[in-house]
Amino acid sequence: MMRNPQKIPLYAIVIVLVLFWLLPVWTTFLVSFKSSEDFLNQKFYQLPTRVSFIENLKNALEKYNLHKHFFNSFLYATVGAGIAIITASMAGFSIIRLRPKFNFLLFLIIYSGTLFPFQMYLIPVYKFFNTIALYDTRIGMILIYAAICIPFSLFVYRGFYTTIPKEIEDAAKIDGCGPLKTFIYIFLPQSIPPTAVVALFQWTWIWNDLLFGMVLTRSQEVRPIMVALASMSGYAGGTIPLIMTGVIFTSVPTIVLFVFLRRFFISGMVLSISGE
Amino acid sequence: MRKNGHVVSYLFILPAFLLVFVLLLIPMFQNIYYSFFEWDGLKKPVFIGLRNYTAFFSDENFLVSFRNTLIWVGFTLVFPVMGGLLIAIFVRGMVLERLFKSIFFIPLTISFVATGIIWTYMFSKELGVLNNLFHVFGINEKVSWLTNVPLNTFSLLIAWTWQQLGVNMVLFLMGLATLPQDPIEAAVIDGANKWQTFVHVTFPMLRPITTIVITMAMVNSFKAFDIIYVMTRGGPYRSSETLAVTMFRETFTLFRMGYGAAISVLLSIIVIAVSAIYIKRMARKELLYY
């Protein structure tokens, strides 16, 4: 079966590494299935005496209100990425097809938003949100997430719209379509691939964000899921099964997205690194 | 008519521009401005010129954090990047290639916060998996992975490698898949062994993708925050902070806003400098296209 005996050491290395990569995954699931008694009394590799996942989940939700934060982040990720998708696709269309004066400069100005570490924005945005009463509000969170997502989204849409043949648009123009109609009826229907990439990346990014959530929110009603998850790690031994159940519960949406949109994940990575 | 069209075309750009301008660009300049002030966030800011920046050199906490940041970058280049390249080469053509790739890919589907929490458990002294695994193999020492300095920084980096290696592996695999096979075959015919072929033929041909991977990995390690914050909060005694964490602590825990702003400006300068090659390459492409 193995063509080349030289390869045996390589297989050994890779298999050891694969096991090391699986160890955290496997133990996380195992712990989340254990009751706290099992967890404290058993060896880490032993199977639970009874499956307590549902019970752990119930306790985790009750104790840490994870479902509320889950809803918050679901809202931020969906609306935030949605705003980014709408505004960035419109801007990309205009920059590439309507070509107003300074279109390239405008693109560069918006795109420069991806170059800086987020730390660069934290203090002024924190202060600004406090002044205009957006601190610790859902609207504030949606707006900052949308703003962060726009530059990369614009980059993707702009790149994609250069590939749509101009003839189609000219034909639309002859038929009397204005820019808005051309955008809605010609460009939007063809925009599914870039939209899938943008939605996957930006939804996941917002869902996973910790920094802005910590700085710009305070109350349980507004705090996103990752802030809630991070503050679960008060490590009294018996609560570890709850925490691990929390890890799984909060990771379900991104895992599902990756499983279903894996194809777009690869093309998104190519886009984000190659600049084409 | 033409003029009218122009107004419409700006209206299309306006919403995206406004959001980015108000929430990112103005704050960016404000942040630079704040970095010249001493300010606790409440009282009136006091202008102190460059003193926040000169204070770096005498601030013990900053120097530790800066050293840790460099360790993060160096370690990232060796383990997640070079490791990612080696694994990409190893798994290509293996019997279970697809399965192996998927396994290295798993950590990418969860957040840094989740990774941090999982590895906090792995490293936990009494109940953690690693110490108990050692016990199974007859090693009874209980290692303090996250509280022992400087081991804690390297423990964080193990978790970081676990999460990051997959991205680099995927990128290198993409690069390897697009390489032309002729030069490699020619080298083999000329009698080059595997190692020589790799060093003299394959690796040089991979250079474009290697540049991108290295740049991205360095930028990401300069920005690393979540894993450190979740696993150690930068502690104990601020021993495992990096610049991103130090900025957060100075600003939002100690309320030295001006100083925090200065750290974020420094961080930005470093990140932009590191990605300069990449930005230049992109800009050239854009201009060509334009």
Image (spheres, coloured by chain):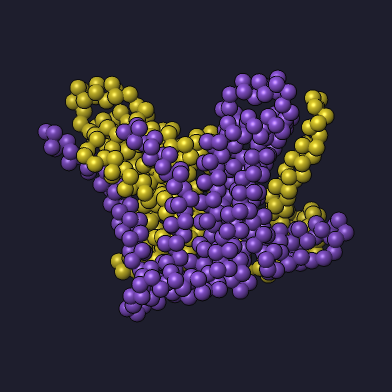
Q: Where does the image place residue B215, in percent across and percent down from the top left?
A: 52, 46
Q: Quadrant of the N terminus of chain B?
A: top left
In the image, what residue occupies the spot 33% across and 64% down?
B30
The chain that appears purple in the image is B
In the picture provided, is A270 more to the left or to the right than B115?
left
The residue positioned 14% from the left and 37% from the top of the image is B4
Image location (x, y in percent) of residue A266: 53, 36
- Res A132 quadrant in image: bottom left
Q: Is residue A203 above or below residue A225?
A: above
Left or right: where does residue A91 sit relative to residue A242?
left
The residue positioned farthest toward the right in the image shown: B138
Q: Closest to the observer: B87 or B271? A: B271
Locate residue A93: give its quadrant: top left
Image coordinates for residue A263, horizontal then vertical, percent: 53, 33
Is B252 located above or below residue B79 in the figure?
below
In the image, residue B141 sits, relative to residue B181, either above or below, namely below
As rendered, which of A14 and A35 lies closer to the eye?
A14
Q: Nearer the viewer, residue B267 or A132?
A: B267
Q: How many marks?
A: 0
Quadrant (top left, top right, bottom left, bottom right) of the C terminus of chain B: top left
- For the colour yellow, the matching chain is A
**Relative to B162, A86 lies left or right:** left
Q: What residue is at 35 percent from the left and 72 percent from the top?
A: B49
- Can the viewer see residue A230 in this picture? no
Q: Position of residue B79 (x, y in %)?
A: 65, 49
